[in-house]
Image (cartoon, rainbow, N blue to C red):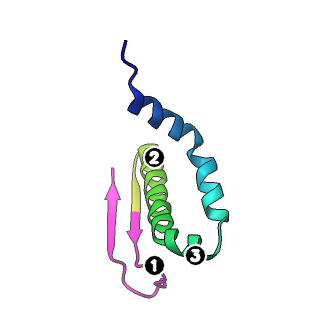
Amino acid sequence: MAVPLEEKFMAQLDMHSSELIRVIRSKGGATCQKIAGIMQTLDQDSRAERAEKDLEQLTMAVFVIRKEGQGCQEPPEDIGIII
């Protein structure tokens, strides 16, 4: 009987991913510099996933997208209404 190793590996990785991320974030020096871009992308993906889940709970929402570091006086990149 064949065991689906890839599925098993991915499931185990999912179980331990938060701990792995915590360990990676605690690293400094060259390791930190090498993975900074990856971690930034991961953070952005996490925020997007959380925002999507939050929006699924709402009947209606208004969203405003601004460039990073942009103040409230600057025009936003995008504005939308989700119903």
Which residue is located at x 46 percent, y 71 percent?
37
Q: Is residue 80 magenta?
A: yes
Label 3 CA crowd tier, 10 Å (few <14, some 14–19, many 20+): few
Label 1 CA crowd tier, 10 Å (few <14, some 14–19, many 20+): few
Residue that lies at the very extreme toward the right in this rendered image: 26
Task: Give the image location of residue 43, x and y in percent.
Answer: 50, 62
Q: Is residue 71 above or below residue 20?
A: below
The amino acid sitting under disc 3 is Ala
Q: Is residue 44 above or below residue 51?
A: below
Q: Find numbered disc 3 in the image and state the secondary structure of the residue it sits on.
A: helix
Task: Indicate which label's residue lies in the foreground, 1 or 3.
Answer: 3
Rounded to the nearest whole Å, what is the CA distance between mark 1 and mark 3? 26 Å
Total marks in image: 3
Of residue 13 and residue 80, the one placed in the foreground of this image is: 13
Label 2 CA crowd tier, 10 Å (few <14, some 14–19, many 20+): few
Task: Give the image location of residue 32, x and y in percent.
Answer: 58, 71
Q: Disc 1 or 3, which lies upstream in sequence?
A: 3
The amino acid sitting under disc 2 is Lys
Task: Give the image location of residue 49, x and y in percent.
Answer: 44, 52
Which residue is located at x 58 percent, y 75 percent?
30
Which residue bears the numbered disc 1? 68
Of residue 18 and residue 48, the one placed in the foreground of this image is: 18
Rounded to the nearest whole Å, what is the CA distance between mark 1 and mark 2? 22 Å
Q: Find numbered disc 1 in the image and state the secondary structure of the residue it sits on.
A: loop
Task: Give the image location of residue 4, x and y in percent.
Answer: 38, 24
Which residue bears the numbered disc 3? 30
Which residue bears the numbered disc 2? 53
The amino acid sitting under disc 1 is Glu
